[in-house]
Amino acid sequence: MKKLDDYMPFILQPQNIARIEDNVILIGDRRAYPLSKEFVSCSSVEDVAVAIESMVTQGGGPVRAAMIAMLFLAGKTDRGEVSRTPDTFINAKKRLQITRPTNTSMARLLEHLVTIICQDIEAGNALAPEVNKFIEDFQSEYERNSFSMAETGAGLIDDGDGVLTMCFAETSFILSIALAMEQGKSIKVYSPETRPYLQGARLTAPCLMEIGADVTLITDSMCAHVMSEGKVQKYMTAVDIVTRDGWAANKIGTFQNAVCANYHGIPYFPFAIDPDMSRRGREGIIIEERNPEEIKMIKGILTTRADMKAFYPAFDIVPPHLISGIITPKGLVSPYGLERVFG
Amino acid sequence: MKKLDDYMPFILQPQNIARIEDNVILIGDRRAYPLSKEFVSCSSVEDVAVAIESMVTQGGGPVRAAMIAMLFLAGKTDRGEVSRTPDTFINAKKRLQITRPTNTSMARLLEHLVTIICQDIEAGNALAPEVNKFIEDFQSEYERNSFSMAETGAGLIDDGDGVLTMCFAETSFILSIALAMEQGKSIKVYSPETRPYLQGARLTAPCLMEIGADVTLITDSMCAHVMSEGKVQKYMTAVDIVTRDGWAANKIGTFQNAVCANYHGIPYFPFAIDPDMSRRGREGIIIEERNPEEIKMIKGILTTRADMKAFYPAFDIVPPHLISGIITPKGLVSPYGLERVFG
């Protein structure tokens, strides 16, 4: 059977996203990659929360980092180093949840995990083995879902296609490209650099190079031009959230590419591993605003006057009519059909 | 009478674009601004050509820099330091013209100037006074045209408008904002940073701050999002070229903003001081491709693997159906009506 690790580049291997080693939590530092492979060391849930807020890990990374933080806390509880009360975990959960207002995957998963932990506290069970099993089950399901989505993704890519992406679409997208290549398809991927954090330049393009894909780095301003030259046949991204009625939020820039793809007759296929069926429409999505100082700097270097006013919405929202189909673990679903499939 | 210099920020003052001083040509270094005000010193036409190619000056800057280079050469000719032949100027013209394949303004102006110089060589006139007069006449006409265009531009901006721009739309745009403010209109300008050269962050936003405008810096990926929030009512840019049949090329990213403006029902008004009536359609425009290494760096710092493949088209092309009206010295002209107005 195919294993995810056989396909994944360095930073997407679970152990390199987050792991416990020598009684500290190591989180793969996506800010340093690809120029170096570094880990940030965390000794508490607070440290992990700050690391997530500081973009040490991003995209799908915070889900695993938060679960590992809970495993760390469970271990401390079992060893009697922190008090064995529901509040210990409820407070940790709350702290981690607020690190990412737009993407609700981690928040929802922690609700589930903390409910189980509270039951185990009441039942008098050791906590770490239970949390560990939760993470292992999550990982197995994630792996199954990733292959299922990537098979759909690879199937949508035709021989000779140019594929535009945005930001870092992670496992399902990288795996889609890998499987399409395995099917003998010749593909070119265009990766916009994704300002201000440069996830495209730092993560997507190097990960695609690592798996041997033909990838070209462009700036975020070049997407429509590349489309107008006939170089793009498919547009594919991750999403941070998809609501019940098919509204999707993802890294800022995703929406304008979707508008331009629509203008050029290019289909847009976002990957969504777990649509948030509790939210509806544009109003159901909270757009995280980050520190505007980050807009005035690139890799710490000032690009304009220090007293310049700036604006930094970290995500934008794509309406369902610009989405051609959502790639989910249950196949390709119309943005208007999520309720039928996910209930 | 109103003078342009009373309104213009530092880098748009003609003397700070290019001037001759102590027998060298000083070109205002737009790469250093706004963090410092520096000049690059040139001792030959070749130096000026290299400075233009290296983006020391850009946008409308090369027009003046090239004329000053010709004035410099005329002075040397008059002093007998170079041979007084048409070839001296024809070769200089050719060298300067190839520095910018997309924007044809400078190329066309040099044709005109060198024709005059060749006549003066034949007539035995001193050359420098003639070139100087040509530059002064150009500057007077430029000033008249800028005020005329800015009055049109300011008239299109309503009280309370948000105005999106792209790259550095220079004199006519900055003056439009200044005149609209003088008319008591409250305006917010959104300036995308304009990767890879950051003309928005380095030039547009600081120039607008310098004249007291309310400007907000955003990344190039945020334009559609800002539109979707109702923050933008007008989209205005310079153009590097407009053809006879209303196709416009400008800094890469201009096209995708035009697509997104159209999607949101926001009119797009480019400024064109001299449409190129010798060119037609998309095929009449040559898109300059610059060194892809520049995509992998920001202010000299590598953002990705050094061996990454990248693509750097410096301009993109807006079709006439996405243009609501072209702001010209002869008023607001339909992209389909240039032939009627400019013959």
Image (cartoon, coloured by chain):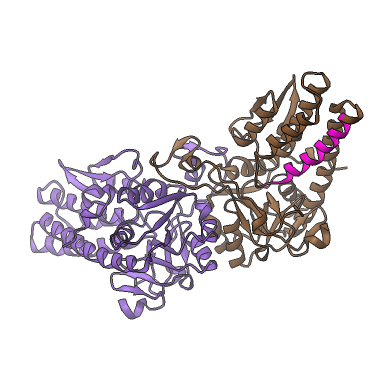
Chain colours: A brown, B purple
Residue B151 in which image quadrant: bottom left
Left or right: A173, with A118 as reference point = left
**Of residues A96 and B174, the one drawn nearer to the viewer in this rendering:** A96
x and y percentages locating residue B93 in the rendered image:
26, 57
Residue drawn at point x = 34 percent, y = 48 percent: B209
Q: Position of residue B183 (x, y in %)?
A: 29, 63
Q: How many marks?
A: 0
Q: Residue at x 61, y 34 (%)?
A: A33
Quarter of the image for the N terminus of chain B: give it.
bottom left
**Image position, residue B257 (x, y; %):** 49, 61
Magenta segment range? A103-121
Name the dominant secondary structure of the magenta segment. helix
Is any atom of residue B118 visible in this view?
yes
Placement of A293 over or under B188, stated as above or below:
above
Residue A9: tell me if it is visible.
no
Which of B68/B266 is in front?
Answer: B266
Within the image, what quadrant is residue A142 found in?
top right
Question: Which residue is more in the foreground, B61 or A55?
Answer: A55
- A107 magenta-colored: yes
Q: Nearer the viewer, residue B192 or A225?
A: B192
Q: Position of residue B122 (x, y in %)?
A: 11, 63
Give the vertical position of A105 relative to B271 (above or below).
above
**Residue at the extreme bottom of the image, as rendered:** B340
User: Where's the C terminus of chain B, which quadrant?
Assistant: bottom left
Q: Is residue A310 magenta?
A: no
On screen, B141 above or below B334?
Answer: above
Q: Is residue A270 left or right of residue A79?
A: left
Q: Residue at x 64, y 44 (%)?
A: A204
| Residue A306 falls left or right of residue A88 | left
Look at 20% across and 60% down and name the residue there.
B139
